[in-house]
Image (spheres, grey):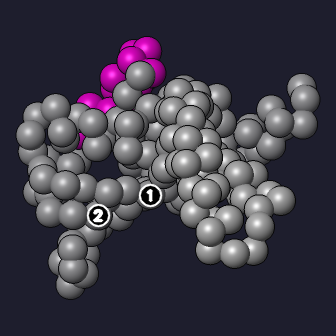
């Protein structure tokens, strides 16, 4: 096993990847069923958060369905189009392109203005290149839809937060 695989399969990292896959599946199932408005989520080794207004029973149902569907091989649910991995990839690629386009640029405002078309072109190209890379990174690195014995231990609702939040605690 190579170093990357060792890190991905290391206890806490593996748990985050499983929880991240289940978080994505849950959000996609809620969206499919139109059971919630705009939601956000983030995962850690203990489970995941769902931020936004959603009925707790609908959320629990989506989590349970997500586990079942992922375990039945519907691994595409683990890849979410609005994942932070996609955004971070686009930001990294776009930022690197912008930085590269400013190398050896003159110091006057005229020099900077003359370079603007190149900056825009390179950043646009970088964002286009990043579009398929983010989901691929989710697939290969940041999620693992093979949940194994992952199970939900608790679902907690935090109504005092604005927007409200749910904490889904997992084990396995």
Residue 163 magenta: no
Secondary structure under tag 2 reads strand
On whether residue 67 falls in the magenta region, the answer is yes
Please tell me the numbered disc located at residue 42. 1
Reading the image, the residue beneath label 2 is 51
Q: Residue at x 16, y 32 (%)?
A: 32
Residue in the picture at 41% in, 22% down: 76
User: In the visual, does 17 lie left or right of 7?
Assistant: left
Q: Is residue 155 above or below residue 63?
A: below
Q: Nearer the viewer, residue 164 or 72?
A: 164
Residue 15 visible somewhere in the drawing: no
* 146 vs 106: above or below: above
Identify the magenta region.
Answer: 62-75
Q: Quadrant of the C terminus?
A: top right
Q: Can you give x and y, in whole percent of width and height, for residue 169 in the image?
A: 42, 58
- Residue extending farthest top: 73
Residue 28 locus on image (x, y percent): 27, 36
Q: Residue furthest right?
A: 2
Q: Is residue 153 left or right of residue 119?
A: left
């Amino acid at each position: 096993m190579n170093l990357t695989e060792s890190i991905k399969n290391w206890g806490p990292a593996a748990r985050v990847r499983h929880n991240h896959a289940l978080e994505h599946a849950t959000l996609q199932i809620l969206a499919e069923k139109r059971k919630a408005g705009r939601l956000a989520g983030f995962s850690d080794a203990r489970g995941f958060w769902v931020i936004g207004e959603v009925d707790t029973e609908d959320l629990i149902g989506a989590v349970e369905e997500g586990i079942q569907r992922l375990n039945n091989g519907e691994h595409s649910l683990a890849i979410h189009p609005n994942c932070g991995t996609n955004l971070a990839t686009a930001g990294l690629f776009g930022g690197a392109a912008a930085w590269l386009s400013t190398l050896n640029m003159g110091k006057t405002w005229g020099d900077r203005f003359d370079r603007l078309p190149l900056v825009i072109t390179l950043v646009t190209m970088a964002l286009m290149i990043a579009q398929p890379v983010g989901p691929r990174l989710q697939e290969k690195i940041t999620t693992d839809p093979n949940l194994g014995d992952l199970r939900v231990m608790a679902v907690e609702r935090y109504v005092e937060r604005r927007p409200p939040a749910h904490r889904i605690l997992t084990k396995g």
